[in-house]
Image (cartoon, helix red, strand yellow):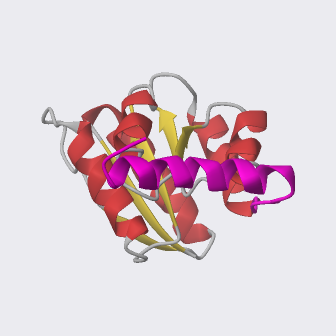
Amino acid sequence: MKIAIGCDEAAISLKEIIKVLLNEMKHEVKDYGVYSAEPSLYPDTAVAVASAIAAGMHERGILLCGTGIGMAISANKVPGIRAAVCHDLFSTQRSRRSNDCQIMTMGARVIGVELAKELVKVWLDCAFVGGNSTAKVSKIMEYEQKFINGGC
């Protein structure tokens, strides 16, 4: 699978650990930064990753910051993208099975390394189930298009 990954300065160490895991799992990984501990603006990285996914360059993305929240908010500004904070097994599974999220976000200051690695494995293994969720995801995309086209 082609996976985009990115972080801010708060999550560089976790990003590097997740990259090793993804390579071990034989995924193709593109790193969108950041690469140093210098303060950065996480929306830049989030939008770069989300835009690349929306353009079809990658199948999924993983974004990391201090809490995961800012990355999710920023990535969700890109039309067609659904990103969710994944800090526990249930919400991680549901982000894929029920919401067809293409991006998972995690907070390096919120969860430990081993949990983060397990959640990545689970998230990559989950597929959108459809069923009752199909209409809900379609409705999200419908509202998104209405806002893009200038109305609600």
Q: Position of residue 81 (x, y in %)?
A: 47, 55
In magenta segment, residue 141: yes
Q: Is residue 78 above or below residue 113?
A: below
Question: At x 71% / y 47%, what residue is drawn?
Answer: 136
Taking the image as shown, residue 10 lies to the left or right of residue 73, namely: left
**Magenta region:** 126-152
Is residue 136 within the magenta segment? yes
Q: Does residue 88 show up?
A: yes
For the N terminus, which image quadrant?
bottom right
Quarter of image, res 127: bottom right
What residue appears at the point 67 percent right and 60 percent down from the top-left corner? 124
Quarter residue 55 falls in: bottom left
Q: Looking at the image, which residue sits at the far left?
A: 38
Residue 45 percent across, percent down from the top left: 26, 49
Point out residue 2 in the picture as x, y percentages from the top left corner: 50, 75
State how many labels appear. 0
Question: What's the magenta bit mostly, secondary-structure-wise?
Answer: helix
Residue 99 visible in the current orientation: no
Toward which corner of the image does residue 86 lie, by quadrant? top right
Image point (85%, 50%), residue name: 132
Q: Nearer the viewer, residue 14 or 88?
A: 88
User: In the picture, which quadrant includes the C terminus?
Assistant: top left
Residue sitting farthest toward the right? 131
Q: Residue furthest top?
A: 110
**Residue 9 drawn at (x, y percent):** 25, 36
The foreground one among 148 and 78 is 148
| Camera-nearest residue between 78 and 108 | 78
Asked whether, in this view, residue 58 is left or right of residue 89, the answer is: left
